Amino acid sequence: MKLERSQFLKELKETFPELTSKINSEEGLSTFEMDVFCDFTQKNINDGEKEVVVACFKIAEKYYRESNNNFKNVISTCFIEDLLFENTKKNYREWAWKLFPKILKEDYISFHGKSGI
């Protein structure tokens, strides 16, 4: 049985309760809900919050692997493709690419034509 968006949102809100109000304000639009998750993940990558990032990647990988094609596409286009891993003067992000699950890396590389670093 495929995992569904409602299960994803429930798990996301239980794991990261601070996202609940932002997710709820998106009025059920899955792409915007995923943008909230992506922004949260990116902020934690930028801040070097390894444990939080690993938890985010774990959830993303689980639903990418086990969801229907429509929701998998939302994860791909609104999460995987939008993450930034290249280092900047302000942010060291390369560490997160090393932790990014292989299946998500493959999707990222397929879209961008290169690795994240």
Image (spheres, rainbow, N blue to C red):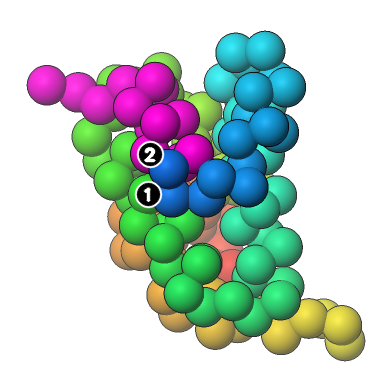
Q: Is residue 32 magenta?
A: no
Q: Which of the 4 image quarters holds residue 64?
A: top left
Which residue is the site of mark 1? Answer: 59
Foreground pick, 112 / 8 = 8
Q: Residue at x 70, y 20 (%)?
A: 26
Q: Earlier in the sequence, mark 1 or mark 2?
A: 2
Q: Is residue 45 above or below residue 98?
A: above
Q: Assign the C terminus to one quadrant of the image.
A: bottom right
Neighbours of disc 2 within 10 Å: few (<14), some (14-19), many (20+): few
> In this picture, which residue range is highlighted in magenta?
1-13
Circle 2 sits on which residue? 11
Helix, strand or loop: magenta stretch:
helix
Q: Nearer the viewer, residue 99 or 112?
A: 99
The number of numbered badges drawn on the structure is 2
Front-lying residue, 38 or 94 = 38
- At horizontal 11% and vertical 21% (from top left) the residue drawn is 1
Q: Which mark is residue 37?
A: none
Residue contact at pointers 1 and 2, CB within 8 angstroms? yes
Percent x, y of residue 91: 78, 81
For the residue carrying disc 1, how many other residues have a C-alpha within 10 Å: few (<14), some (14-19), or many (20+)?
some
Residue 80 in picture, x, y percent from top left: 54, 48
Residue 36 occupies which quadrant of the picture? Answer: top right
- Specify whether residue 3 is painted magenta: yes
Residue drawn 71% across and 76% down? 47
